[in-house]
Image: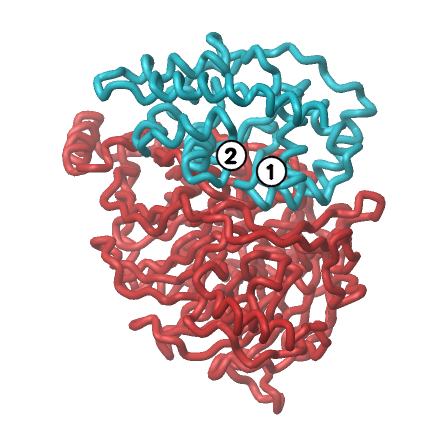
Chain colours: A red, B cyan
Amino acid sequence: MARSGIGSPIAGALALAIAVATMGSASSQEVKSAVKYGDMTTVSQDLLNRAESDGNNFLLTNGDYWQRRYYPNTQINTANVARLHPAWIFQTEVKESLETSPIIVDGVMYVTTSFSHVYALNARTGEEIWHYKHKLGPVTTFCCGPNNRGVAAYGDMVYLATLDSKLVALDAKTGNVMWQTDLADPELGYSETMAPTAVNGKILIGTNGGEYGIRGFLRAYDAKTGKLLWNFNTIPDNSVGVWAEKDATGRDMHRDIAAEKAQLAKSGDPFKTLGGGVWQNPAVDLETNRIYFVVGNPSPDLDGSVRPGDNLYTDSLVSLDLNTGQYVCHFQYIAHDIWDLDAVSPAIITTVAGKDGKPIKGVIHAGKTGHVYVHDAKDCSLIRFSEAMVPQENMWTLPTKDGARMLPGANGGVEWSPMATNPVLGLAYAINLHQPMTYHVANAPYPQGKLWLGGAFKVIPTEEQWGNVTAVDYNTGKIRWQVKTPQPMIGGVLATAGGLVFTGEGNGQFKAYDADTGSILWKFQAGAGVNAPPSSYTVDGKQYIVVGAGGNVQLDYKRGDAIIAFTVD
Amino acid sequence: MSSRTARRAGGGAQLVAAIVLVASVVGAQSQTIEEKASSCGACHGEAGIPQDKTKPMIWGQQEGYLYLQLRDFKRGTRKNDEMSPIAAALEREDMLALAAYFAQKPWPSLEQARAPAEVAKRALVAIGSVGCTGCHLGEFQGDGSVPRLAGQSREYLAKTIADFRTRERGNNPGMSDLMNATSEDDLAAIVEYLAGR
């Protein structure tokens, strides 16, 4: 490590030896350590609390606890972004889908790759500090790629959730395992791809598995010990709900309520295998001590006949008490979803115009339906929804054996991709897919952890696909600007106080847009799909933009292995 | 119809073979994994290439997938006249050990011909339509619980897809749904394409 400065090789070796000796049961994992880099900063709760105004670090998956993805540094801005160029490129050893949100702490960057690897990098140069390669168990169950969306940094540790459904705490200096906890049984369809969230001594984590008949959860673990503090089942024991016939926008979903009630009487509440994965981080409101997150689709995806009722809390925004995990409120977008048009893009807390136009604390979420939904944070109620960002046709046509065409396709609208916001402009930036599909239904009993779709969603090969970047005024629901892209979009967005919006495309283009107008101000061809959320940081007084270019499994965009940091000189 | 008759006629011989194999796979506790695995070669090939092309190659196959198949044969969610009795006698540890043993073997090449360009093109459109690469990954090598498909026996791939369509292969209803949502002509192209990769 040419620039590591402090610590002789002997001291480094000694530290490593001590660390290895304390690894215990984690010794089977492969850690390629190097001499520690610099004076690594402890990530205090106070530092995290102030993340939204921290123009040096990027401390949380989506920038700050409210998940605004609005980076406060203005050094890179509309006036100089044309001069943005790669500062360094780091190649991981994993050439597969990259969905990582880089976390940067005082000049040290943590990124993850598919198959649950973690790298610590020198954020100035891209040099590797350490590499943790999680030894995956034989059974891993994933529907949409062996992805990982990043780590949480807290205290002197970084936290990773793995494809084989474990929560792992690593020493931030060495990558050595400090503790590891089993979250759930991969043989029953559980897996992890999301980044954890660290707050007030807790590590918050959800689960994947909505395509496998799991019972979803969001949990809090003790950051120091890995002990479970609370568990919230995203599927309550009574999942029936209110027999809602209309979606959040008031459209009839054509449910056969009588048939569902007859099925309920026959088979009972389907809560034990009803899915409800949590794909993305919760937003945290420290003022009220509450968290907000969205819950994914019911299992099986397309066959509603075996799961009568509204299937609470699938396809919903949910709020919990941070200390206890107790339910506070929810809002369901689509009751009894049979299209997999669920809720995956992370919730964002921000100030919005309430129903009476006065500013209140709101929660916004971008749906696969193609709407941005705006809620009152107090009770989760819906204030408004945006104009549709993509074509909607034949909603809500019921899936058939031979396939029924409906738009949007099952990937959205907005997939898991996090939005960014610009609170000054009152805009939320969403990336969308337009991918026409037919929806097919089939019936099969619960398959004990195997793929359980209840049918299929098929891309219609003869129809054009595309994507867009859309700026939505969340105070009115109107689309401010929209830029069409040649391919469906998946990855994520970063906005900055420099008046910029960054997002990448499956064809390798990484672009900067004018936050106010959508004008393309800069672009770079990364050579592989840029399908990960960008981050920004500043070190030694110089601001960088960083993003992963590894392509995407789900849309089969060209794979790569690069983490690319950009700067202006 | 003819194949079904033939299978029934051969049932007795298969049962005897399966009993012999059960005895040798399960064997004594003192058997090494190599000894336990050696009898698998009778069907799956001494050097990893089965003589009967409708039998899968298991050398170099993904570990989690192999384990889950043995588990499912034992559970009865996947049925096969030869494999079901063999798996019924295996403990979980045996299944995991056998899976790890075969996963570490090199994947043999059957030297199956590459699909012609037009067939490959048709296959890729169909693959893109239902999203095969979402699980089997871009090079169709699979991972963990998801099997490698690239270079698998053409006849086995065709038989497996057919069995998924009829749900005779019942241990992955999601695969049955996806195969049933794909036309037979497209599936034939996919078989050619995957076998030749």
Chain under numbered label 1:
B
Quadrant hosting residue A203: bottom left
In the image, is A541 to the left or to the right of A391? left
Residue at 59%, 79% in the rendered image: A243
Q: Residues within 10 Å of mark 1 (few under 14, many from 20)?
A: some
Amino acid at dot 2: Lys
In the image, is A479 to the left or to the right of B134? right
Q: Which residue is mark 2?
A: B79
Between residue A345 and residue B143, name the one nearer to us. Answer: B143
Instruction: Indicate the position of residue A548 as horizontal and vertical percent values.
Output: 54, 41
Q: Residues within 10 Å of mark 2 (few under 14, many from 20)?
A: some
Q: Quadrant of the N terminus of chain B?
A: top right
A149 versus A507 height, above or below: below
Give the structural element (helix, strand or loop) at label 2.
Answer: loop
Query: Which numbered disc flags the more N-terminal residue, 2 or 1?
Result: 2
Instruction: Indicate the position of residue A230 as horizontal and vertical percent values.
Output: 29, 65
Residue at 18%, 36% in the rendered image: A19
Amino acid at dot 1: Glu
Instruction: Indicate the position of residue B128 as horizontal and vertical percent values.
Output: 71, 39
Mark pair 2, 1: CA separation: 8 Å
Quadrant hosting residue A567: top right
Q: Which residue is mark 1?
A: B168
Chain under numbered label 2:
B
Give the structural element (helix, strand or loop) at label 1.
Answer: loop
Between residue B139 and residue B77, name the one nearer to us. Answer: B77
- Among all residues in the image, which is located at the extreme top? B47
A478 versus A21 height, above or below: below
A102 versus B55 height, above or below: below
Residue at 38%, 32% in the rendered image: B88
* Residue B13 visible in the current orientation: yes
Say whether marks 2 and 1 touch (CB < 8 Å): yes
